[in-house]
Image (tube, rainbow, N blue to C red):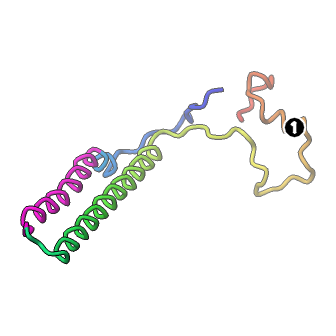
Amino acid sequence: MNWFKKIPQSHRSASGLEWRLWRKLPLIALVGTVLPLLCLGLLHLLADPQADAAQLRWLQMMGYVLGGVILFHWTMVFTVGIGCVIVIIMKGPGYVADGYRVSHSDQPRASMETAEEAIGHRLPENERGDNRPL
């Protein structure tokens, strides 16, 4: 069984924003991770060494907030990456996805399809003995 049989007259669409964005995603992920970490490092450097409990609690809370910002950023980068992959695949050539005849149509059959007819539609051309396309 050939899973990747291309449709003969299909063509690739021109690439657009998805490839430019796909190539920039590692840089976007790196910058979006480093900036909050630099902010957290700066907060710790500027913090008073003899801080009281309230200031330490605030510093710890900022650590949690910036950790959440980083996690949110990674999630958004991953989501945009999935979107880029989907658009890249959709702009590629068309492939035959399913060789089965559609059971519903604009003109429904008057009677049910027999088992032999169903099997005949599902067999590849070389096993059917005729040259009808699937």
Measuring from the top left, give residue 14's x and y in whole percent.
36, 45
Q: How many numbered circles are shown? A: 1
Amino acid on which the number 1 mark rests in the picture: Glu
Measuring from the top left, give residue 98's x and y in whole percent.
67, 40
User: Which residue occupies 84% across, 34% down?
Assistant: 119
Q: Is residue 39 left or right of residue 68?
A: left
Measuring from the top left, give residue 102's x and y in whole percent.
75, 48
User: Which residue occupies 78% across, 22% down?
Assistant: 127
Chain part drawn in magenta: 23-49
Of all residues shown, which one is farthest toward the bottom? 54
User: Which SS class for mark 1?
Assistant: helix
Image quadrant of residue 51?
bottom left
Measuring from the top left, give residue 74's x and y in whole percent.
33, 55
Q: Is residue 46 left or right of residue 71?
A: left
Q: Is residue 51 left or right of residue 120?
A: left
78 relative to 52, above or below: above
Image quadrant of residue 70?
bottom left
**Which quadrant would the N terminus be assigned to in this image?**
top right
134 relative to 69, above or below: above
Question: Could you say which is closer to the camera, residue 111 or residue 46?
Answer: 46
103 relative to 64, above or below: above
The answer to whether residue 38 is magenta is yes
Badge 1, how many Cα within 10 Å: few under 14, some, many 20+? few
User: Which residue occupies 80% across, 22% down?
Assistant: 129
**Which quadrant would the C terminus be assigned to in this image?**
top right
User: Which residue occupies 9% across, 68% down?
Assistant: 47
Residue occupied by mark 1 = 117
Question: Could you say which is closer to the camera, residue 104 or residue 23?
Answer: 23
Q: In this view, does 98 lie to the left or right of 45?
A: right
Image quadrant of residue 91?
top left
Question: Could you say which is closer to the camera, residue 111 or residue 17?
Answer: 17
